[in-house]
């Protein structure tokens, strides 16, 4: 579970409950009872073990792909007209056809010889009768030989064709088995890769060798083009720019955005009527920010570089006039296990005007100027600590006291909790 969405939930809670009731969730605790930690990590494979398993699964998959390729080649070879068994089968079929033709000719010779005997006149001499009879006998003998030759040729052809077809069937069966093995190996490889990626992600959030993620103020998230007043029933497009202000490449940067809204009293949430969407530079398709997940990772974000994310805020026409705030932040995770991100959530406040309103030209929303007193907020070690009542908003618009309180609460919690220990080896991933 990512820590940003937990903070965002705490922000929403801050709108409807006094600051002195707001407390850091036990999920942020640095230390947990040994037995509890042991239960979660018992029999859990290490990153090294998962990497070994993933490598083995890849090797098996690669071998399966090669075997499938070889099986395809073997099948193509057996289907070729130049295949030895195919050549033999064709020769046998040709011989059988020739033997069949020879038998037909021999049988016709018998018919002709018999007709000649039958056609002898009564005046035929004994020599003529003997010659006709001999010719008939010879024709019958030749016909019997042709019959036997044809039977042998037919049998040879059947045997040759069966041998050719058996080889082809075996090749098809072998290809099918190879394809099945490849599919199973791919499934195993995918599962191993996913297990390794998940373990790295969970472990990466805790830092290398159990170290903490670190605050990195130079990873900035800035919103531009979001109006300070948005009319219900409309949608507005704006931009989120994520900038790596450090001198090192960040392998994976996860932008985070969250929108929260209330009626004018600040006591009734209207989140279900406010929708935040985003799309990347590579895709024009709009995706909904569901307040539970980060947006797609920017991989990588080079030193000094930035990435722009198109954002869209849609407010249902039924939304009452009220207040809204969009929080943005960013975290990074490197392949070597180091991680960090913005130490606070940055809030951009806006007013929600009733449907049909004509606010005219309005300025862009500005980042919250709330500077909460965070002196009482410290990293939690074994139990939750209430956030001080001094989190009341200072310097915010009087039209948004509740949201300013929420913003202050988020920043206070963020400063003390967003980089709490999320240790890989202890298994206490937040």
Image: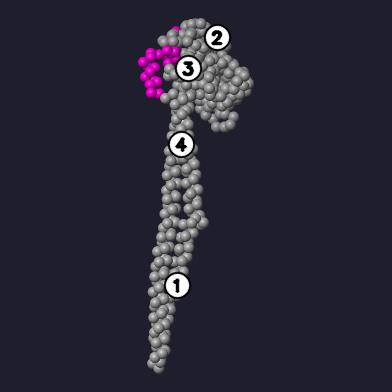
- Which residue occupies 62% across, 19% down? 247
In terms of sequence position, does the residue under pointer 1 or pointer 4 come before the other?
4
Quadrant holding the C terminus: top left
Q: Secondary structure at mark 2?
A: loop
Of residue 409 and residue 376, the one placed in the foreground of this image is 376
- Which residue occupies 43% across, 60% down? 160
Can you say whether 3 is above or below 197 in the image?
A: above
Real-space Cα distance between discs 2 and 1? 108 Å
- Mark 2 or 1, closer to the camera: 1
Q: Secondary structure at mark 3?
A: helix
- Quarter of image, res 242: top right
Q: Which residues are magenta?
A: 18-44
Residue 412, position in %: x, y? 50, 11
Give the residue at mark 3.
210
Give the residue at mark 4.
60
36 in magenta: yes
Answer yes or no: do the residues labelled 2 and 1 have beta carbons within 8 Å? no
């Amino acid at each position: 579970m990512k820590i940003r969405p937990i903070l965002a939930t705490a922000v929403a809670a801050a709108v409807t409950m006094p600051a002195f009731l707001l407390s850091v969730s036990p999920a942020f605790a640095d230390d947990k009872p040994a037995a509890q930690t042991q239960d979660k990590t018992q029999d859990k494979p290490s990153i090294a073990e998962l990497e070994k398993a993933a490598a083995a699964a890849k090797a098996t998959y690669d071998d399966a792909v090669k075997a499938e390729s070889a099986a395809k080649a073997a099948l193509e070879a057996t289907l070729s007209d130049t295949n030895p068994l195919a050549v033999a089968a064709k020769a046998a079929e040709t011989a059988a056809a020739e033997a069949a033709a020879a038998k037909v000719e021999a049988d016709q010779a018998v018919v002709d010889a018999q007709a000649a005997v039958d056609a002898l006149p009564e005046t035929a001499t004994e020599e003529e009768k003997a010659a006709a009879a001999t010719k008939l006998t010879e024709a019958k003998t030749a016909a019997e030989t042709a019959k036997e030759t044809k039977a042998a040729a037919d049998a040879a052809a059947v045997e040759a064709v069966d041998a050719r077809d058996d080889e082809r069937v075996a090749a098809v069966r072998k290809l099918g088995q190879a394809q099945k093995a490849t599919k199973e190996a791919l499934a195993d490889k995918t599962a191993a890769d996913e297990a390794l990626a998940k373990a790295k992600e969970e472990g990466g959030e805790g830092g290398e060798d159990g170290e903490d993620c670190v605050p990195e103020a130079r990873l900035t998230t800035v919103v531009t083009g979001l109006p300070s007043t948005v009319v219900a029933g409309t949608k507005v497009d704006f931009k989120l720019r994520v900038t790596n202000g450090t001198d090192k490449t960040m392998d994976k940067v996860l932008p985070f955005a969250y929108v929260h809204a209330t009626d004018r009293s600040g006591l009734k949430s209207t989140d279900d009527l406010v929708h935040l969407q985003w799309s990347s530079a590579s895709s024009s398709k709009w995706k909904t920010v569901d307040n539970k997940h980060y947006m797609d990772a920017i991989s990588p974000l080079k030193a000094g570089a930035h990435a722009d994310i198109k954002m869209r805020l849609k407010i249902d026409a039924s939304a009452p006039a009220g207040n809204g705030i969009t929080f943005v932040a960013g975290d990074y995770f490197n392949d070597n296990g180091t991680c960090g991100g913005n130490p606070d959530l940055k809030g951009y406040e806006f007013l929600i005007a009733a449907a049909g309103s004509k606010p005219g030209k309005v300025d862009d929303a500005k980042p919250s100027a709330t500077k909460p007193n965070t002196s009482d907020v410290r990293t939690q070690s074994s139990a939750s600590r209430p956030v001080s009542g001094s989190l009341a908003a200072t310097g915010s618009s009087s039209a948004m006291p509740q949201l300013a309180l929420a913003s202050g609460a988020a920043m206070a919690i963020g400063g003390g909790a967003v980089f709490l220990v999320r240790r890989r080896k202890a298994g206490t991933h937040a």
